Image (spheres, rainbow, N blue to C red):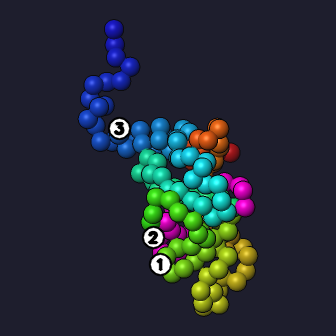
């Protein structure tokens, strides 16, 4: 009987990288407990397939984003969980529940006053679902037309 996975795949780094992308990011992954996200601005972070993802409570609605600032690509959240605005510690950009920057220091210098400009800096959003007290996240599937 032929094995489903070739034995060489278990130690092949390219296979592992592909597996992280497909299996870890495109399937539902346990992110944490809803009890850690009960209050406005509660958040938790999770590593999924090599990407840091933040799940945050925005007035009772859970949203998840790639935990990387769209300005200088630093991590927005550095703690595993806590409470506070979705604000990058590096240059203090603040993001709304859609992942769009709403507070940018010296915004006039960046010419980012127009809503279209700010929307182009939107954080990559992930899907969030609750099952009882469990919170799950996954990267949205990209469909090509």
Badge 1 or badge 3: first in the primary sequence? 3
State the predominant SS element of the stretch in magenta.
loop
Question: Where does label 3 land, which residue?
Answer: 15
Q: How far apart are marks 1 and 3 (CA)?
A: 35 Å
Badge 3 crowding class, 10 Å Cα cut-off, few under 14, some 14 to 19, many 20 or more, is few
In this rendering, is residue 60 above or below 69?
A: above
Badge 2 crowding class, 10 Å Cα cut-off, few under 14, some 14 to 19, many 20 or more, is some
Left or right, 52 with reference to 103: left
- From the image, state whether disc 1 or disc 3 is nearer to you: 1
Question: Where does label 1 land, which residue?
Answer: 90
Task: Residue 123 in the image: state x and y as whole percent.
Answer: 59, 64
Q: Quadrant of residue 40?
A: bottom right
Specify start and end residues of the magenta stretch as a single range.
59-77
- From the image, state whether disc 3 or disc 2 is nearer to you: 2
Badge 3 or badge 2: first in the primary sequence? 3
Left or right, 28 with reference to 103: left
């Amino acid at each position: 009987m032929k094995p489903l996975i070739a034995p060489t795949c278990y130690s092949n780094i390219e296979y592992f990288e592909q597996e992280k992308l497909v299996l870890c990011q495109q399937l539902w992954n346990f992110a944490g407990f809803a009890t850690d996200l009960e209050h406005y601005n509660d958040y938790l972070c999770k590593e999924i397939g090599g990407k840091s993802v933040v799940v945050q409570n925005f007035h009772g609605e859970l949203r998840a984003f790639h935990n990387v600032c769209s300005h200088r690509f630093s991590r927005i959240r550095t703690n595993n969980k806590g409470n506070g605005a979705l604000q990058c510690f590096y240059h203090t950009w603040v993001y709304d529940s859609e992942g769009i920057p709403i507070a940018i220091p010296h915004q006039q210098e960046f010419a980012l006053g127009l809503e279209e400009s700010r929307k182009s800096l939107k954080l990559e959003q992930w899907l969030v679902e609750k099952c009882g007290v469990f919170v799950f996240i996954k990267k949205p599937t990209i469909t090509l037309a």
